[in-house]
């Protein structure tokens, strides 16, 4: 997981000088993301606890509040469960978590056997929409080379105002 020099795990000295520079009216350039983590695990229900634990650890380490961490963990659980249930045996699910000073962006993908992995009117989708600030889903056409439908779900949650 990479830090931009002013993110979690650094001395924090850069943050103070950035704030001072911003206060003096100079433009401050922040890295696109302070950190990111990618994981790929077998698409089986037994791996849900691993995905939840990774998301929780990454976000707590990045100084997100417990409210944000819980919202993202529950949203990830709903998305990953829906996708895993739509996957054929032997598939893998990929999860990417990126965070910056403003919030966290999560991308979950796999190749599903159906186009309706996370339906618009499903209860799980409503939960994810309620817990996050942005939710996007895409399902590509059947790909014969992959043997299924490439599905990507992205959601984002902003930091609470006093987080960073």
Image (spheres, rainbow, N blue to C red):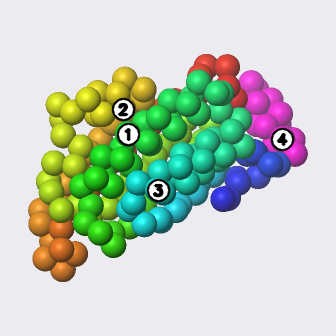
Residue at 64% x, 47% y is 58
Camera-nearest label, 3 or 4? 3
Using a 10 Å C-alpha cutoff, classify the residue at mark 3 as few (fewer than 14 neighbours), some (14 to 19) or many (20 or more). Answer: few
Measured in 3D between alpha carbons, the distance from the residue under mark 1 to the one under mark 2, in whole angstroms, is 7 Å
Left or right of 147 on screen, residue 155: right
N-terminal-most mark, 4 or 1: 4
Q: Which mark is residue 78?
A: 1
Q: Which residue is mark 4?
A: 12
Using a 10 Å C-alpha cutoff, classify the residue at mark 1 as few (fewer than 14 neighbours), some (14 to 19) or many (20 or more). Answer: some
Camera-nearest label, 4 or 2? 2
Residue 26 on image: x %, y %: 70, 33
N-terminal-most mark, 1 or 2: 1
Left or right of 20 on screen, residue 75: left
N-terminal-most mark, 4 or 2: 4
Measured in 3D between alpha carbons, the distance from the residue under mark 1 to the one under mark 3, in whole angstroms, is 14 Å
From the viewer's side, name the closer residue of 32 and 152: 152
Residue 134 on image: x %, y %: 37, 33
């Amino acid at each position: 997981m990479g830090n931009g020099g002013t993110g979690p795990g650094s001395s924090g000295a850069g943050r103070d000088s950035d704030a001072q520079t911003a206060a003096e009216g100079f433009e401050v350039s922040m890295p696109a993301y302070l950190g990111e983590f990618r994981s790929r695990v077998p698409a089986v229900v037994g791996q849900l606890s691993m995905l939840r634990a990774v998301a929780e650890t990454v976000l707590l380490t990045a100084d997100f509040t417990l409210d944000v961490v819980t919202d993202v963990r529950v949203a990830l659980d709903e998305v990953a469960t829906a996708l895993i249930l739509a996957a054929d045996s032997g598939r893998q699910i990929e999860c990417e978590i990126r965070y910056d000073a403003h919030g966290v962006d999560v991308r979950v993908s796999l190749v599903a056997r159906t186009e309706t992995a996370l339906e618009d009117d499903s209860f799980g989708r409503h939960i994810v929409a309620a817990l996050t600030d942005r939710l996007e889903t895409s399902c590509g056409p059947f790909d014969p080379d992959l043997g299924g439908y490439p599905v990507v779900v992205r959601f984002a949650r902003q930091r609470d105002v006093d987080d960073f």
